[in-house]
């Protein structure tokens, strides 16, 4: 077959290559995958098969997606995708994947690709029960924590399903703690000392909020019942009688008195048992009985007493694990009524028209001296103050046959301005019988002193004021009352010296005003302290706080964090990939601070994702086509009545990835051939391989490797960096003939280099005949070296009939080739002589480096 016949070429290798090609034809790229947020409106672009496969296209699964048969673009249908309905709860932490089948390309390849349904925050947290009940003992120490079993659930995933909790209306008594050991655990913590007798029930709001960009929340009512412990003992009330008088002829079971004790605890802890003290006289025990549960004191028999008599009863009240409380009841037996002597009054304190006048807040003071008419003081008569419930602030003490009337505690003008003291005469007749009491009423008026500070109707006021207000605008009028009278009750107002100078108050009316325009962005809230002072000497005052919330107006345009954003993005990112986050702030609040971004003055394949505040791609990027984009962003708020705007510049640099395999420039074809004289000395460069790579950086750095023949069996050496091919040793007789060097040209790209191959055909021949090949050599080694490099994994296609057809065609081509080889051999011998000079010129041209390429690619380094 002449010099053009490769030594290692055989029909088995050709058949092997053919089978590899058939296998590759039935593969598709498994890296094709698309993602789309759930609940998208119809017509949303989910991705495109046109970026990966040639047309036409046919989608075999028409649920949720439809496909343009010409472009391969995938769009959402009227049937919205609900991630929570499509994917079971057990896959919450994983991707929600829907598999779709399609037929692509002119040969009708069957492919399968996944569609990832991304979560959006469309589910609010949910409590199974709207009320959560918890019982906490009142003696629980501060810092004690209680597990809250009932947590909220959120069907979303990621941040949309991550929940955080807080309490409302807890009054600082309870708080929350969180633990993340084996999952989120919520603990209710006691922050202040509990007292069931003060407050038994706490109703709080437990709020669960997710971490979505627009957070959703749910609220459950947390009801904490403070349970009782035995921390209180019985006490007799003030209403319990201390002395009683009963007729001397009272019948059996007559109710003498009812003693009452109370225990602030509940249930068994508040159980009280009444009993008579062991020190009660035998006569009293015989005459009276005490009900241990009700405290009723009754007669055990009928009375038939003609004489007056007093009996002392000491009653005990006993509670669980408590010392007994006691009270004394004096029972007086009176057989008949008699008239006692008259009372004479000698005033000591200031008085007017038989009325005592006493300033309030005086310490115990003697008011008057009382005595009975004549010499009756020595005949068994006595004076006492008659009181209902024992609550009068006066005492009567005997002294040398007379009685001193005094105050027992300071009097309060605001509580009671006038008192009436009822003095009662007790005694016996000449026959020794008890008489009915006679009375004398003494009037006492209380004079006011400045002992009350002014009091506001409430301690705090709240007010909303729009910013940019008109200076001098009135806000609200505060008012305080003083229980004192006259100058002591006259109130004036002032502001605390630390309050903002933009506020003022009228000292007489309490009208609060603002003297300057407020700016919410400078200060969104003001707390003002207002003092109310009376006219007493010395004056008294009190305070109230006024909380002013400054309402927002749309007076600030959106502000970019920088006027010029610079982003770097790899060229292989899929459509809708994030390019970068756009830093944008608007100090206004609500809709006035709710901003929206859009691309203006730019034609690049980019769109703004306002939900995330990011810039995204709309199509695939190719650095080799365009490595830089310039665009402008317009930010606008939603303020009323006029939206405010601002702009920023964005520069996007497309970073290179290794998506271009090297291209061999020289030799120009695998059938090129070069004659090497046998006398060429070792180290001589006989030719050079020239290749380029359109990528940049390491992705474009090229190395050359001779795969065949083995290095020690070939007299030629390939420099891995320059591509220079030199004679490695002195050429010998055994080296005469054709040498086929199979060269792999690789780049240095990551994560995997790309490569191409080229045959360099060298003929060691001493004749001047030009080298000529009828056809290019064929590689029969590892199939991986002849495949076009691919960045994606490969998976099988089910249809095998197409492969069988290719195999039959290949066998037919082999038979035809055998016939053509015979014809070609005859024609070759006939034309060899005529084409000698022509082939020589062509060989020189093919191996000569063009001037332009030589300047660009050739280097002696």
Image (spheres, helix red, strand yellow):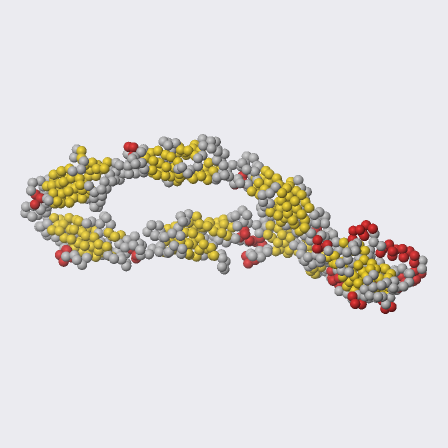
Q: Nearer the viewer, residue 111 or 239?
A: 239
Q: Say left or right for 825 vs 503.
A: right
The answer to whether residue 44 is above or below residue 2 is above
Name the residue located 8 percent from the left edge and 47 percent from the top edge: 433
Quadrant placement of the N terminus: bottom right
The tally of labels here is 0
Q: In the rendered image, is residue 415 in sight? A: yes
Where is residue 158 shown, x and y percent of the image?
Answer: 55, 53
Q: In the rendered image, is residue 618 in sight? A: no
**Which of the 4 image quarters holds residue 719?**
bottom right
**Which of the 4 image quarters holds residue 604?**
top right
**Residue furthest to the left:** 431
**Residue furthest to the bottom:** 734
Where is residue 747 shown, x and y percent of the image?
Answer: 73, 57
**Which of the 4 image quarters holds residue 538?**
top left
Q: Nearer the viewer, residue 733 or 234?
A: 733
The answer to whether residue 11 is above or below residue 572 is below
The answer to whether residue 67 is above or below residue 598 is below
Name the residue located 78 percent from the left edge and 51 percent from the top edge: 856
Q: Say left or right for 638 vs 266.
A: right
Q: Say left or right for 100 vs 157.
A: right
Name the residue located 36 percent from the left edge and 39 percent from the top edge: 543
Where is residue 734 shown, x and y percent of the image?
Answer: 86, 68
């Amino acid at each position: 077959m002449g010099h053009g016949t490769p030594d290692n070429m055989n029909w088995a290798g050709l058949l092997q290559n053919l089978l590899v090609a058939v296998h590759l034809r039935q593969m598709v790229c498994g890296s094709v995958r698309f993602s789309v947020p759930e609940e998208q409106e119809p017509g949303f672009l989910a991705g495109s098969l046109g970026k990966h496969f040639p047309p036409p296209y046919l989608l075999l699964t028409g649920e949720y997606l439809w496909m343009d048969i010409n472009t391969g673009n995938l769009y959402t249908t009227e049937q919205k995708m609900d991630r929570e309905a499509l994917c079971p709860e057990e896959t919450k932490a994983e991707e929600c994947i829907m598999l779709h089948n399609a037929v692509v390309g002119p040969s009708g390849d069957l492919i399968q690709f996944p569609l990832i349904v991304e979560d959006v925050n469309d589910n609010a947290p949910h409590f199974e029960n709207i009320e959560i009940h918890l019982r906490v003992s009142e003696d629980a120490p501060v810092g004690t924590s209680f597990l809250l079993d009932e947590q909220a659930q959120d069907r979303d995933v990621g941040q949309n399903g991550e929940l955080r909790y807080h309490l409302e209306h807890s009054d600082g008594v309870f708080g929350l703690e969180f633990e993340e050991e084996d999952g989120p655990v919520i603990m209710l913590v006691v922050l202040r000392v509990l007292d069931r007798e003060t407050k038994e029930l706490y109703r709080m709001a437990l709020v669960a909020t997710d971490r979505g960009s627009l957070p959703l929340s749910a609220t459950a009512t947390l009801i904490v019942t403070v349970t009782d412990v035995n921390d209180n003992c019985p006490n007799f009330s003030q209403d319990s009688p201390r002395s009683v008088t009963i007729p001397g002829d009272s019948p059996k079971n007559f109710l003498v008195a009812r003693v009452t004790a109370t225990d602030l605890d509940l249930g068994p802890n508040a159980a009280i048992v009444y009993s008579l003290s062991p020190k009660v006289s035998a006569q009293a025990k015989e005459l009276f009985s005490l009900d241990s549960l009700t405290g009723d004191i009754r007669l055990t028999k009928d009375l038939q007493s003609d004489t007056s008599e007093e009996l002392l009863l000491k009653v005990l009240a006993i509670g669980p694990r408590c010392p007994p409380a006691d009270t004394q009841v004096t029972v007086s037996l009176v057989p008949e009524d008699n008239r006692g002597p008259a009372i004479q009054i000698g005033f000591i304190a200031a008085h007017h028209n038989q009325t005592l006048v006493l300033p309030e807040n005086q310490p115990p003071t003697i008011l008057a001296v009382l005595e009975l008419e004549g010499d009756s003081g020595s005949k068994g008569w006595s004076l006492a103050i008659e009181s209902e419930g024992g609550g009068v602030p006066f005492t009567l003490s005997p002294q040398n046959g007379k009685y001193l009337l005094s105050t027992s505690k300071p009097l309060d003008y605001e509580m009671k301005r006038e008192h009436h003291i009822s003095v009662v005469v007790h005694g016996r007749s000449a026959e020794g019988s008890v008489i009915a009491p006679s009375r004398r009423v003494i009037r006492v008026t209380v004079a006011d002193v400045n002992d009350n500070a002014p009091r506001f109707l409430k301690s705090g006021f709240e007010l909303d004021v729009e910013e940019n207000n008109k200076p001098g605008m009135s806000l609200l009028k505060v008012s305080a009352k003083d229980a004192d009278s006259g100058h002591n009750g006259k109130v004036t107002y002032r502001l605390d010296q630390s309050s903002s100078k933009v506020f003022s108050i009228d000292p007489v009316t309490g009208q609060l005003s603002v003297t300057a325009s407020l700016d919410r962005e400078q200060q969104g809230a003001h707390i003002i302290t207002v003092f109310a002072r009376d006219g007493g000497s010395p004056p008294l005052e009190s305070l109230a706080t006024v909380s002013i919330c400054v309402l927002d107006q749309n007076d600030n345009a959106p502000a970019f964090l920088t006027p010029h954003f610079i982003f770097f993005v790899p060229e292989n990112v899929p459509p809708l990939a994030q390019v970068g986050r756009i830093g944008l702030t608007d100090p206004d609040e609500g809709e006035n601070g709710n901003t929206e971004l859009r691309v203006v003055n730019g034609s690049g394949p980019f769109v703004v994702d306002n939900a995330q505040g990011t810039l995204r791609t709309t199509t695939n990027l190719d650095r080799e086509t365009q490595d830089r984009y310039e665009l402008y962003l317009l930010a606008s708020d939603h303020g009323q009545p006029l939206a405010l705007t601002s702009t920023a510049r964005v520069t996007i640099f497309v970073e290179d990835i290794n998506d271009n395999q090297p291209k061999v420039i020289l030799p120009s074809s695998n059938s090129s051939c070069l004659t090497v004289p046998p006398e060429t000395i070792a180290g001589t460069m006989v030719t050079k391989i020239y290749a380029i790579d359109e990528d940049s950086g390491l992705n474009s750095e090229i190395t050359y490797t001779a795969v065949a023949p083995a290095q020690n069996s070939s007299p030629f050496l390939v420099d891995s960096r320059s591509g220079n091919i030199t004679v490695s040793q002195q050429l010998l007789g055994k080296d005469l003939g054709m040498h086929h060097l199979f060269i792999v040209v690789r780049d240095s790209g990551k994560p995997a280099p790309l490569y191409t191959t080229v045959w360099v055909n060298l003929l060691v021949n001493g004749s001047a005949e030009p080298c000529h090949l009828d056809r290019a050599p064929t590689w029969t080694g590892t199939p991986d070296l002849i495949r076009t490099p691919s960045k994606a994994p490969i998976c099988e296609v089910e249809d095998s009939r197409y492969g069988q057809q290719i195999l039959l065609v290949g066998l037919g081509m082999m038979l035809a080739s055998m016939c053509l080889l015979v014809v070609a051999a005859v024609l070759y011998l006939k034309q060899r002589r005529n084409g000698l000079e022509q082939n020589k010129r062509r060989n020189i041209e093919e191996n000569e480096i063009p001037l332009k390429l030589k300047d660009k690619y050739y280097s002696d380094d």
